[in-house]
Image: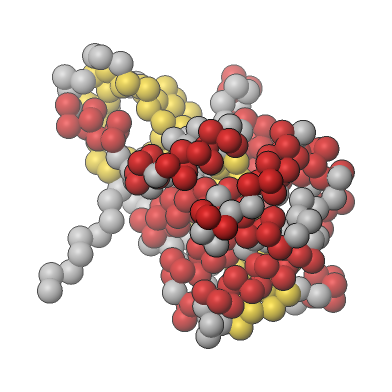
């Protein structure tokens, strides 16, 4: 697929379905009418979802997490299959034994399987059968992406049954208030069986469900590639789709049955993004003690002040602070590259 091959009428039709709202879209059945729908979606909307997954996977690597060795990947509700392809590309196809895809649209299953086979020709790729869905056999790595706001209760119950069979789960959703809080409630139900790898820096209950935090939600922002802003095709797409290309809000949860490696104590996660004012920056902080609004005076650490505004990495820090006033902070950074 190239920009010259893009099916703009198909994207316009998909956009109209999205604008009708998730409930109406789900009731109307699968989005996809032709393979061209999926190819055009994967090239545009799907690529934006891929950037969210890239940021999640960057964070998981910062936290020294990797999939269970030789895991079979199951992409549930696969759509065009972008989520599984990003995961397999990030860790390498040799890290996985197979990929199985499922979607309520046979067109989507065909597209996702074909795209994965083309990108990873040595990887075993299958489409899930009804028998596989109904079985009790273990699932290695369960991948879930952008499905929660369209799931009727019976579909969510079926998905929870699949989660109960998984060794590990990676789940990414849009970063809206409603969806994030719903995913957070599901996270609470998973804590007894899984270790929560991310986004949390602690294993406790989610503090956004405290009585005084109803307006808050756990969400983050992925940075889109800088070059798209100078690309007239992406600019045209953003204008036609009514999308702010700068904004990629998401929420996610990563679960693993293996013992948690964890990070050293004292790490915090910035929720959303910091607000910057002339004399200070402030943000919503999440750590083992709960949620707290923190503030960094610019004069206390000007370099950190600028870093919080410009960093493209997940905002995971260990603060030096007195109450809600931060004096400095240490970022969780990738390990240094080995010298050649």
Residue 26 sits in which quadrant?
top right
Asked if 98 appears above or below 203 in the picture, the reply is below
For the C terminus, the image quarter is bottom left
Which one is in front, 98 or 201? Answer: 98
Residue, far left: 340
Asked which colour scheme the image uses, the reply is secondary structure
Residue 98 point in image, percent of width and height = 60, 79
Residue 14 point in image, percent of width and height = 71, 44
Tell me which residue sits at (58%, 72%) in the image. Answer: 116
Q: Is residue 121 left or right of residue 25?
A: left
Tell me which residue sits at (76%, 73%) in the image. Answer: 128
For the N terminus, the image quarter is bottom right
Residue 60 sits in which quadrant?
bottom left
Which one is in front, 191 or 247? Answer: 247
Q: Is residue 187 left or right of residue 235?
A: right
Residue 327 sits in which quadrant?
top left
Q: How many marks?
A: 0
Residue 182 point in image, percent of width and height = 69, 38
Tell me which residue sits at (77%, 33%) in the image. Answer: 20
Tell me which residue sits at (30%, 16%) in the image. Answer: 277
Q: Is residue 280 left or right of residue 151?
A: left
Q: Is residue 35 at all visible to an observer of this figure?
A: yes
Q: Is residue 140 at all visible to an observer of this figure?
A: no
Asked if 213 appears above or below 148 in the picture, the reply is above
Residue, far front: 4
Residue 169 point in image, percent of width and height = 60, 60
């Amino acid at each position: 697929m190239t920009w010259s091959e893009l099916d703009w009428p198909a994207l316009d039709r998909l956009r109209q379905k999205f604008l009708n709202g998730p409930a109406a879209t789900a009731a109307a059945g699968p989005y996809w009418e032709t393979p061209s729908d999926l190819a055009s979606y994967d090239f545009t909307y799907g690529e934006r979802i891929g950037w969210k997954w890239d940021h999640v996977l960057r964070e998981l690597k910062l936290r020294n997490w990797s999939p269970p060795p030789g895991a079979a990947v199951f992409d549930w509700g696969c759509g065009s299959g972008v989520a599984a392809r990003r995961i397999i590309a990030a860790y390498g196809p040799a890290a996985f034994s197979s990929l199985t895809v499922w979607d309520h649209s046979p067109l989507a299953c065909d597209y996702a399987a074909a795209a994965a086979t083309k990108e990873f020709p040595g990887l075993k790729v299958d489409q899930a059968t009804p028998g596989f869905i109904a079985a009790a056999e273990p699932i290695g790595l369960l991948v879930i992406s952008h499905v929660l706001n369209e799931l009727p209760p019976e579909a969510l119950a079926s998905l929870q049954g699949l989660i109960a069979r998984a060794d590990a789960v990676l789940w990414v959703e849009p970063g809206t208030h409603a969806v994030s809080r719903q995913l957070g409630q599901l996270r609470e139900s998973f804590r007894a069986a899984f270790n929560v790898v991310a986004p949390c820096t602690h294993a406790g209950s989610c503090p956004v469900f405290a009585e005084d935090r109803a307006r808050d939600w756990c969400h983050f922002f992925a940075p889109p590639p800088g070059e798209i802003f100078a690309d007239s095709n992406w600019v045209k797409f953003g204008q036609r789709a009514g999308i702010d290309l700068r904004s990629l809000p998401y929420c996610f949860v990563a679960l693993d049955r293996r013992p948690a490696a964890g990070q050293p104590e004292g790490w915090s996660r910035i929720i959303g993004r910091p607000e910057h004012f002339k004399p200070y920056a402030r943000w919503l902080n999440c750590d083992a003690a709960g949620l707290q609004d923190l503030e960094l005076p610019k004069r206390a650490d000007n370099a950190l002040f600028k870093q919080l505004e410009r960093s493209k990495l997940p905002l995971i820090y260990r603060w030096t602070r007195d109450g809600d006033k931060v004096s400095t902070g240490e970022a969780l950074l990738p390990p240094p590259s080995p010298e050649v």
